[in-house]
Amino acid sequence: MQNKLKFLALLLMVSLLSGTFVLAQTSNESLYEQTSEMGTLIVGYQRDVDAINDFYYPYSAGGTYSFPMTTFKSPEQRKRLQDINKDYLSKLKSAKFEGFSIYGKVDYILLKKQIESSVWLLGKEETEYNALSKYFTFADAIYALEKLRRRGTYKDGSLLAAQMDEIAKQIDALSQNFTKQASLKADQLKMATAITLSLKHRLKGFYQFYMDYEPGFTWWAPKPYERLDLALTNYAKFFNDKGDPVPAAKSNKPEIKGNPIGREELIRQLNAELIPYTPEELIQLAEKEFKFCDEELLKASAAMGFGKDWKKAQEKIKNSYVPLGKQPELIVKLQDDALSFIKANDLIDIPALAEETWGMVMMSAERQLVNPFFTGGREISISYPTNSMEEDDKLMSMRGNNPYFSRGTVQHELLPGHHYQYFINNRYKSYRDPFKTPFSVEGWPLYWELLLYDKGFAKTPEEKMGMLFWRMHRCARILFSLNFHLGKWTPQQCVDFLVDRVGHERANAEGEVRRSFKGDYSPLYQVAYLTGGLQLFALKKELVDSGKMSFKVFHDAVIKENLIPVEMIRATLTNQPLTRDFTTSWHFYDQLK
């Protein structure tokens, strides 16, 4: 009997190590709570991609990165990534999809979607690079120098110095003829700048590897390197200067810029995010949600004694701001209020450690130029005036972060919003992190805004108006971002819309639009807040309102699937039949029918 138990224990260990062991599903524990049949393949793909990028990106002295991770990929690096993609697509074809659990099928679809997106993006990057190749006839010579460094290949220092000198001459010749070339579009200018700076980083990695360690190189290379490095720096300025308009007036605030991506690219990205609606349909969705906000806003305004003049009612609310130094105390109070309400309504179980460990920091004046309201995650970053702000901006920051506006968003940033996501997603299916989508990242905390309003968290007209401000803002984000990317609105029109239609302070509206279009994240990010929240609200209606799940079971199940597309969370929770070639089909907003 003892030997039999040892054998079973050994079998269990082997099964766990091989990734083939299947936990028995019980009423209290989901099958594959931490992984699935696809877990090993997903992690393998992620690590293989990391290995390629780690190897083919440039290094500085000491083996540390000398560049931002957005450094432009070399042709060799793109090819190797495509090789990896091809290899894993082949592995997916041979996977036993039909026998997988719902968790494995969802992971299969997500990995396939990610790889196919990578294939497309790398192909697009190669096409765009080739279109600019006439400006970078010297690039292959720098890539060749970098290749020597990777394996420490020895080459006479005088020959390497001569090569660098020759490359610098090529750049000088291109620079002299640059103004005679055909004009470049804004996105081409941005890419050309990235290519040039990437080559500069790669050259630096090559130089630092040999300098001081190889005597001949140390004797011959410094001057040619300095010349070539300066030539690359100056060459990058051609693309930057060509793209920057002459400023109309002196200002300490950065200009609001952006590059509309167009309808075709919007639709491609929506499909990639598993959103089955067109930009026009999402605009219609936002307008319908705005109508609801308008109706609720007028009720609150009337209850405050302002009749239909909601802007006067909102003005009273804005002036309820707390004195300087008191904003952190307000944040704590609003978080406590939200948690008390959530617990009283038995909506979700939040671990005591999650409540204990959320933090707070004060946001810098510089960051508030693009984040006029507080942000969250592991900690909440509080927007409130600093001594370096202009006087008008100080007042606008205080008015825009008043207690009633903040009431609906503290829980968005902390519990059960972004901090709770941070807490749980590090503990459950963390291998799904590359599959995360802003429609879940922002959809989950936005869903809580919708749910709390629906449950009566806002009791007074002032509290309702404060929460409605943010709900209107989410509608406005869909409208102004999509209209901008469709080429219909300018950044200034977006700012004016936020001021006139939502009631933003102008400085805060400028910061919001500046943040939306500066290019740091997806063009769909602003669309994702309300859209993702409505997806989860529709799923709540399907599973909780119907009596199939309690709120606690539903919320626990959703958050533990990590930040994958909501349609895939729905497929998991409903055990939806899935195929290898799944495409988005869940029309979650029935008001568009």
Image (spheres, rainbow, N blue to C red):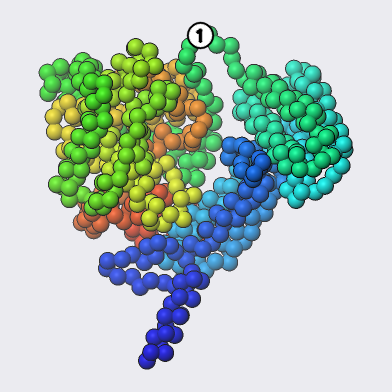
| Quarter of the image that includes the C terminus | top left
For the residue marked with disc 1, what is the amino acid? Lys
Residue 297 in which image quadrant: top left
The residue sitting at 75% across, 38% down in the picture is 211
Residue 330 place in picture, x, y as percent: 22, 30
Q: Is residue 416 visible?
A: no
Count of all numbered marks drawn on residues in the image:
1
Residue 302 place in picture, x, y as percent: 14, 21
Residue 501 place in picture, x, y as percent: 32, 20
Residue 458 in which image quadrant: top left
Q: From the viewer's side, name the closer residue of 401 and 446.
A: 401
Could you tell whether 452 is left or right of 575 in the image? left
Is 506 placed above or below 521 here?
A: above
The residue sitting at 38% across, 89% down in the picture is 2
The residue sitting at 61% across, 41% down in the picture is 65
Residue 317 in which image quadrant: top left
Is 413 placed above or below 480 here?
A: below
* Residue that badge 1 annotates: 250
Q: From the viewer's side, name the closer residue of 100 and 208.
A: 208
